[in-house]
Amino acid sequence: MTDTIMVGVDGSGRSLRALVWAAREAALRSCALRIIHVLPPEHEYASTPEGRAWEESHRDRSVVAEATTIAREAHPDLDVTSALPSGAPPAVLLAESERAHTLVLGAKGLGGFGSLLLGSVALQVVGHAVSPVVVVNHVTTGHGRIVVGADGSAHSRAALAYAFEQASLHGSQLRTVHAWSHPGPHALVSAAQNAAAQERRQALEEWLAPLIKEYPGVEVVEELPDEDPVLALARVSDRADLLVVGSRGRGGFRGLALGSVSHHLLQFSQCPLAVVRPRPEPTA
């Protein structure tokens, strides 16, 4: 079941874009696509059990039926299943993510304010999901490039592994971005700064070496911009088909589920964003 691509839909435009991305990903992987539309414990619109039953049978089932039709028309051979579980959407999606290769969500659903790019459901799920979560705001194709942020943390290593897998699957170039800033004015160049830059490059090459060996067909481009990581990754995202980051990096507090870089990129990425965390070790 962990080879399944899962997508949450609610009938909104962004969730349909997430569906398009998820269906294409499932077709490329030759795996099943599972469509999830979460029902709240009690619908807010109807005041009687009969009314709630009517809503479920008409509106909610039509959302799933439309999503299933779109996926099957785009990929006739795709194995598509669907479910309408009931409960709090973040809790239901988090439970589903335990059995998914990747969980795909739209950046904002039907609820919330129109000015917000990221919905509360997506934010909660991204911070705690076991599987990688891809948040789709803009669907981009044709660049032939995947970008991944690297900083040497455990979350970053998980992101690198996912990015290499994606680049191999899609036949894309992989740009690895290790952004860092040296102390002092940018106009001053010293031997110490050059040595620090060389240390950073050597560290990046060490992080990449085992994955390059595992995926010899992936073209890898290394970038070490002297820039804030959010700015560097957001800048290159407008020329990428997917941006991949770890849920948390080296900085921040250990108790936080989502780091500042991944949190900001959920708002500013110009392409679908995959947020990856290390999968827990199986218990004996």
Image (cartoon, rainbow, N blue to C red):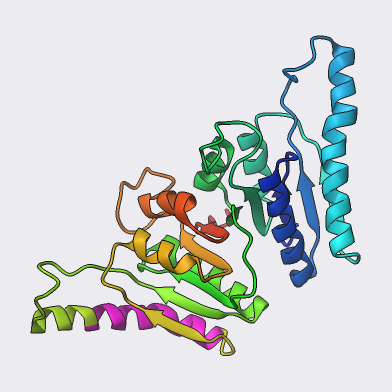
Query: In the rendered image of this protein, does residue 278 appear above or below residue 152?
Result: above
Looking at the rendered image, the quarter that the C terminus falls into is: bottom right
Residue 189 in the image, given as x and y percentages of width and height? 11, 80
Which residue is at 84% across, 31% downward? 59
Residue 33 in the image, given as x and y percentages of width and height? 79, 57
Residue 166 in the image, given as x and y percentages of width and height? 61, 72
- Asked whether the viewer can see residue 86, the reply is yes
Magenta part of the protein: which range? Answer: 198-214
97 displayed left or right of 198: right
Q: Quadrant of residue 242?
A: bottom right
Which residue is at 73% across, 49% downward? 16
Query: Of residues 108 and 158, which is closer to you in this image?
Result: 108
By secondary structure, the bulk of the magenta-drawn segment is best described as helix
235 displayed left or right of 64: left
Query: In the rendered image of this protein, does residue 191 appear above or below residue 37?
Result: below
Query: Of residues 235 and 146, which is closer to you in this image?
Result: 235
- Asked whether the viewer can see residue 247, the reply is no
